[in-house]
Image: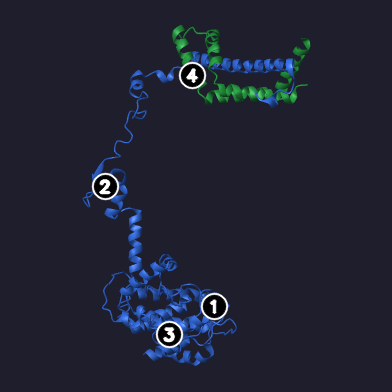
Chain colours: A green, B blue
Amino acid sequence: MSKESRMRATINQKLTEMGERERLKELLRAKLTECGWKDQMKAHCKEVIKEKGFEHVTVEDLVVEITPKGRALVPDSVKKELLHRIRAFLAQHAT
Amino acid sequence: MKMEDMPLSGPDNTKLEALVHDIYSELVEDACLGLCFEVHRAVKQGYFFLDETDQESMKEFEIVDQPGVDIFGQVYNQWKNKECECPNCKRLIAASRFAPHLEKCLGMGRNSSRIANRRLASNNNMSKSESDQEDNDDLNDNDWSYGAEKKARKRKSDKNQNSPRRSKSIKHKNGELGSSVSSEPYKYNYNTGISYETLGPDEVRSLLTTYFLFLQQCGVISEHTKKMCTRSQRCPQHTDEQRRAVRVFLLGPSAPSLPDADTVVESDSFDIPDGQTLMSRLQWEDSPDISPADSASSKASTNHSDSRRPKKKKRPSLGLNSGGGGSLTGGGGSSSSSSQSNISLSTKKKRPKLSAPSISSIYDDLN
């Protein structure tokens, strides 16, 4: 187990150090905007805010409402591409 | 999953996959969180709902999503099947073809005027000595296709029967068209700014001389277009023999010979003042008959030779005056004496050369 966790730690470290994590983040954000996910989520946010009254809405409220829906709404193509890239990275750099 | 992404076997594999998915989830949550922060800040700063402030205009411009209609609610091919009546020709034209039809029908618009100009120019006086290169090109295009050439030749033979240029080019074609064409009554009389119809053969000769001398052009008459070649004396399409033949044909047997590269004669100094004298004689002799454009061109060439004057390095030993009436005889006398020494011209200098002395002897003949 610790071996595994050590491996994970190493991988994560590598991801960050080599800048791959940032690149993946940017890639994901760009793809999500492109496919309209962001606009969808914003519309949902509006509804939440109107519900809660926009004077008192907090970040926590939004996070709680948005994250599960967001995760579900990511299109399959975007998901596949990201998984592919992560796997490629691991294949290259796993010990 | 792709095979190349699974380097390890069995249990490690699943662990790796789990790891991959974990990393993926992290990234997605990160994105969501980023969005939340962005929205929250927008709400608190007050710019989140800015595009929803005006309910009325929002309803007015709502996106329409019905079949057969675009997002503004307009029917997009409404006018496709309609026909309009042209106010000019009273025909019923399809709506999408209406604008181009009107352009041609009314004769306005770029294309129709271009076509009309081209037609006019080709039907017009071919004997414009300062013919536009453009017109030449347009007409020369006809040469490539035999059918067009026949048609063009026929059209050209019909027009401007009175044009002096025409008679010469016919002779040049060995009398092929010769008598048949010249006997036809002349059908068209195109009224253009430069009308050479009023010029007699003498004036045309003088004009052609100007053409040859001042402009130093090849001058060989093309069989196809019956125009003189406007390229330089060294144009590769025509030989010197042809040029000499044209000059002899047009100006008589004592025509100045072509510039010979071999002999360098220091006769440049005589040329220009003689040329000016010559042009003034031309103007006097032919003044009642020369059309305005002709005198304009001769004036232009006179001016041209004027401008060239200061550049000369050798001064004439004969003090020839330019354009003066009194110098006429003096010019004639001195030029005839130098005519023997003066036949061939040097091509070394770039200015056009004038073999004026020989020309003036021709004019003695004409006179």
Whole-angstrom CA distance, mark 4 to mark 2, is 49 Å
How packed is label 4: few (under 14 Cα within 10 Å), some, or many (20 or more)?
Answer: few
At label 3, the amino acid type is Phe
Task: Name the element at disc 1.
Answer: loop
Q: Are marks 4 and 2 on the same chain?
A: no
Are the residues flagged by discs 3 and 1 in contact, CB closer than 8 Å? Answer: no
Q: Is residue B344 left or right of residue B137?
A: right
| Mark linked to residue A40 | 4
Residue located 34% across and 64% down the image: B119
Q: Position of residue B172 (x, y in %)?
A: 41, 81
Q: Is residue B354 visible?
A: no
Task: Name the element at disc 2.
Answer: strand
Q: Are marks 3 and 1 on the same chain?
A: yes
Whole-angstrom CA distance, mark 1 to mark 4, is 85 Å
Q: Is residue A58 above or below residue B185?
A: above
At label 4, the amino acid type is Gln
Q: Which residue position holds label 1?
A: B312
Residue located 45% across and 82% down the image: B246
Q: What is the chain identity of the residue bearing mark 3?
A: B
Q: Which residue position holds label 2?
A: B93
Of residues B116 and B291, the one drawn nearer to the viewer in this rendering:
B116
Task: Name the element at disc 4.
Answer: helix
Q: Is residue B318 above or below residue B22?
A: below
